[in-house]
Image (cartoon, rainbow, N blue to C red):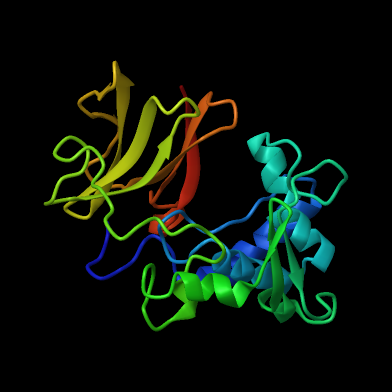
């Protein structure tokens, strides 16, 4: 199913179709959100800026793209007093230099970062983590305005969930932190596993979804946790490769 060297996760030629679908979904009343994948490709802040410019490319108006990047995410996650500028809401903001309506690239020209009502110089924030996180010579990979995670990460559940001779990725925790879903790739095929925290100890992982040929990846729980969503690379009509989002009831 998967040709050697062929990345089934995402292809450049899909981008135009994907963002056109995003616009149609949004204009049809769908609750569209956006953000960088955790631990993959882009970092929060810089990844969000790139997402904004991609939404503009798709045909979103500036205010629509901002709504997708902020308020819609807060609504989906059920977060209160965040995601928009209102009296009594959290004072977590960025001030841009330029006219965002005239040029979408202005999203990258951050003049001030405001966190919990305190104003910070973005250049000083980047300088404070230089050489500690991301690339030592590329500001794009610094954690923009976020606390550095430290330079000694710990392996999660070694030899129970994380093994040195295989790939584990695409994970999600339940809201209470007691259930954990993740993908495991072996011999080019990914399956979804789960583990549960019982009396402070993670249970031995068990397979939730697997197949000898097709890959299942990116598990994600619905807001009420009644469904487990995932992607699958099962072929479409006439043998064409297809990549779909599916779900199962929990």
Q: Position of residue 66 (x, y in %)?
A: 76, 60
Please determine whether, in this image, residue 71 is positioned above or below residue 199: below
Write down the quadrant of residue 55 in the picture.
Answer: bottom right
The reply to whether residue 61 is visible in this rendering is no
Write down the quadrant of residue 151 in the picture.
Answer: bottom left
Q: Position of residue 29 (x, y in %)?
A: 79, 46
Please determine whether, in this image, residue 76 is positioned above or below residue 41: above
> At 65% from the left edge and 71% from the top edge, which residue is drawn?
54
> At 67% from the left edge and 46% from the top edge, which residue is drawn?
73
Please determine whether, in this image, residue 189 is positioned above or below residue 192: below
The reply to whether residue 123 is visible in this rendering is yes
Q: Nearer the viewer, residue 247 or 150?
A: 150
Please determine whether, in this image, residue 213 is positioned above or below residue 10: above
Is 88 situated left or right of 194 in this image? right
Is 122 situated left or right of 59 in this image? left
Write down the quadrant of residue 30 in the picture.
Answer: top right
> At 62% from the left edge and 55% from the top edge, which residue is drawn?
34
> At 42% from the left edge and 56% from the top edge, which residue is drawn?
238
Q: Nearer the viewer, residue 160 or 205?
A: 160
Is 62 situated left or right of 94 in this image? right
Quarter in which the N terminus is drawn: bottom left
Residue sitting farthest toward the top = 199
Q: Position of residue 26 (x, y in %)?
A: 75, 53
Q: Count all numbered tags in the image, as a single digit.
A: 0
Q: Nearer the viewer, residue 3 or 107?
A: 107
Is 130 situated left or right of 225 in this image? left
Q: Position of residue 203 (x, y in %)?
A: 24, 23
Q: Nearer the viewer, residue 8 or 235?
A: 8
């Amino acid at each position: 199913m998967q040709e050697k060297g062929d990345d089934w996760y995402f292809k450049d030629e899909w981008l135009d179709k994907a963002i056109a679908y995003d616009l149609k979904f949004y204009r049809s009343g769908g609750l569209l959100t956006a953000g960088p994948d955790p631990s993959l490709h882009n970092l929060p802040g810089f990844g969000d800026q790139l997402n904004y410019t991609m939404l503009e490319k798709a045909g979103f108006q500036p205010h629509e793209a901002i709504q997708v990047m902020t308020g819609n995410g807060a609504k989906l996650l059920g977060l209160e007093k965040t995601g928009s500028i209102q009296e009594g809401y959290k004072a977590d903001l960025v001030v841009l230099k330029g006219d965002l309506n005239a040029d979408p690239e202005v999203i990258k020209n951050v003049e001030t970062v405001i966190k919990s009502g305190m104003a910070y110089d973005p250049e000083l924030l980047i300088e404070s983590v230089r050489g500690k996180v991301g690339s030592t010579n590329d500001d794009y990979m610094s954690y923009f305005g976020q606390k550095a995670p430290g330079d000694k990460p710990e392996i999660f559940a070694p030899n129970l969930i994380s093994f040195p001779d295989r790939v584990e990725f695409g994970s999600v925790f339940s809201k209470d932190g007691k259930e954990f879903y993740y993908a495991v790739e072996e011999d080019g095929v990914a399956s979804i596993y789960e583990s549960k925290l019982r009396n402070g100890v993670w249970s031995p992982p068990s397979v939730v979804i697997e197949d000898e040929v097709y890959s299942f990846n990116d598990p994600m729980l619905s807001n009420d946790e009644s469904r487990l969503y995932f992607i699958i690379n099962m072929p479409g009509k006439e043998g064409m490769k297809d990549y779909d989002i599916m779900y199962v009831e929990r």
